[in-house]
């Protein structure tokens, strides 16, 4: 069965450094999402992306965050200058249109020290 | 802001027992999804309910969507250790808008 693939599985970075998290959504999916889950807290929406542009973003997704779909397969999340509070599991997800299931990747655990 | 409250937060039961976990909101959702998440992996969709009063069964799991589409429950019959995990409910509005997640119920089934 097709899967959403995320790399790396674990990223450790120093405060103030830039990180890029990588995702390969399911190939025929059209809607792409980033969510995050801080340890012990709920899964929170960051941003959705459709037709090569951001369709919706949350308050968390400030100027330090950006997303790109540089080619036909990758979907990246960049954090320009990481903060300690950015430490979390970051999940990429993708889906087909309308009422179809949302498929999650296995996440990247980001640790900012 | 739409919120989903899940209860209980933690549940530890013996193998063979039945249990029900709840997902409540003051907001109406067009759909309600239940996910199961194990350590180190992303949430895996169990079921989607879309009609008020709808009941869906998945083997020993029974999912119900409230009549007013504001709440949902998950009932597990004869729980097994393999049912251990974090159960998340997530509310959806129109088809492609982001899901709103609850904090989850962490279930531990002891053999």
Image: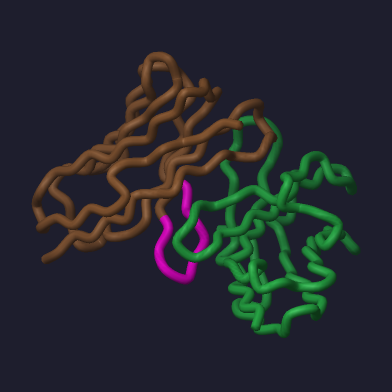
Chain colours: A green, B brown
Which quarter shows the C terminus of chain A? Answer: bottom right
Q: Residue at the location (65% across, 30% down)? A: B95
On the question of residue A10 being in view, the answer is yes
Query: Quarter-wise, where is residue B14 in the image?
Result: bottom left
Image location (x, y in percent) of residue A4? 64, 61
Q: Is residue B57 left or right of residue A99?
A: left
How far across and down, in percent of the image, does residue B52 sit?
42, 16
The residue depicted at 44 percent of the width and 23 percent of the height is B70
Who is closer to the viewer here, B12 or A31?
A: B12
Query: Residue at the location (63% across, 74% down)?
Result: A110
Tell me which segment is drawn in magenta: B37-45
Q: Main secondary structure of the magenta part?
A: loop
Residue A38 lies, in percent from the top left, at: 55, 62
Residue A53 in the magenta stretch? The answer is no
Magenta span contains residue B41: yes
Q: In the image, A103: left or right of B23? A: right
Q: How many marks?
A: 0
B110 to B27, vertically: above or below: below
Q: Is residue A3 visible?
A: no
* Residue in view at x 69 percent, y 41 percent: A96
Task: Answer with left or right where residue B89 lies relative to residue B10.
Answer: right
Image coordinates for residue A20, horizontal then vertical, percent: 79, 73
Eyeballing the image, is B78 above or below A11?
above
What is the quadrant of the N terminus of chain A in the image? bottom right
């Amino acid at each position: 069965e097709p899967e959403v693939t995320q790399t790396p599985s674990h990223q450790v970075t120093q405060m103030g450094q830039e990180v890029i998290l990588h995702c390969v959504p399911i190939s025929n999916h059209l809607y792409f999402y980033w969510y995050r889950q801080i340890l012990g807290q709920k899964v929170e929406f960051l941003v959705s992306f459709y037709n090569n542009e951001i369709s919706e973003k949350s308050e968390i997704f400030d100027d330090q965050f950006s997303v790109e779909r540089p080619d036909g397969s990758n979907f990246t999340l960049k954090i320009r200058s990481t903060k300690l509070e950015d430490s979390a599991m970051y999940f990429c997800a993708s889906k087909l249109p309308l009422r179809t299931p949302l498929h999650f990747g296995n996440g990247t655990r980001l640790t900012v020290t | 802001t739409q919120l989903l409250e899940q209860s209980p937060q933690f549940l530890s039961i013996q193998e063979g027992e039945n249990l029900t976990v709840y997902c409540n909101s003051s907001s109406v959702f067009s759909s309600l999804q239940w996910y199961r998440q194990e350590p180190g992996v992303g949430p895996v969709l169990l079921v989607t309910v879309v009609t008020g009063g709808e009941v869906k069964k998945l083997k020993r799991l029974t999912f119900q969507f409230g009549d007013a589409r504001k709440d949902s429950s998950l009932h597990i019959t004869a729980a097994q250790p393999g049912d251990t995990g974090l159960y998340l409910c997530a509310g959806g509005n129109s088809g492609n808008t982001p899901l709103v997640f609850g904090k989850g119920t962490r279930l531990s089934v002891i053999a």
